[in-house]
Image: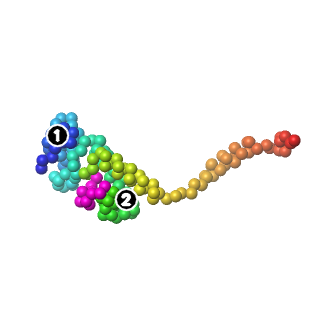
Amino acid sequence: MNLRCPECDSPLVLKQTEKGDHFYGCSADGCSGTVWCHPGTINPMGIPAVAKVRYLRYRCHRRFDRMWKEGYYTRDKAYAWLAAWFKLPEDQAHIGMFDEEKCLRLLELLEDFYASRAPRKVMRKSRQHKRAASIKRRRTEPETDEDTEWE
């Protein structure tokens, strides 16, 4: 596999964490270009990215996965929704293949998606809020008719 770093164009080499997870990391010192492997394999999960893009992908996945975990769509339909929005074939509609621009766009789309489906809550005043308002009213209202000036 011939993977290159998106930051410095150095080759990525297969590495392993202490837990045994595999990833491809940049061979140059101090460079953040990496891509994780699918569990139990040495197959990359997407395309290599720098730290900022990996963080955006992480945020996208956290929000995107809610679509199917909370029952808005099935997992397949959620990925079909993703493919349709980005006009991609479904086999290429994976957040691990997104660049910074696509990640930012997806975060906007997901924000709109969840906002449009948020339950409309009727705001009720709490007892404490009602009590505070009542006390405030009593302080501003005259206590007796004598306190009020009549013309």
Q: Which residue is mark 2?
A: 67
The local crowd at label 2, few if under 14, some if 14 to 19, many if 20 or more residues have their Cα within 10 Å, is: some
The magenta-colored residue range is 86-95
Amino acid tagged 1 = Asp
* Residue 133 seen by the camera: yes
* Residue found 12% across the figure and 47% down from its top: 2
- Residue 70 versus residue 81: which sits nearer the camera? 81
Q: Which residue is mark 1?
A: 9
Of labels 2 and 1, earlier in sequence is 1
Numbered tag placed on residue 151 in the rendering: none
* Residue 59 seen by the camera: no
Query: Picture coordinates of residue 8 (x, y %)?
Result: 19, 38
The number of discs equals 2
Q: From the viewer's perspective, is residue 101 above or below residue 8?
A: below
| Closer to viewer: mark 2 or mark 1 | 1
Query: What is the spatial separation of the Cα atoms under label 2 and label 1, in whole angstroms?
Result: 36 Å
* Residue found 28% across the figure and 44% down from its top: 53
Q: Is residue 92 magenta?
A: yes
Query: Picture coordinates of residue 39 (x, y %)?
Result: 21, 54
* Residue found 27% across the figure and 55% down from its top: 94
Amino acid tagged 2 = Met
Helix, strand or loop status at disc 2:
helix
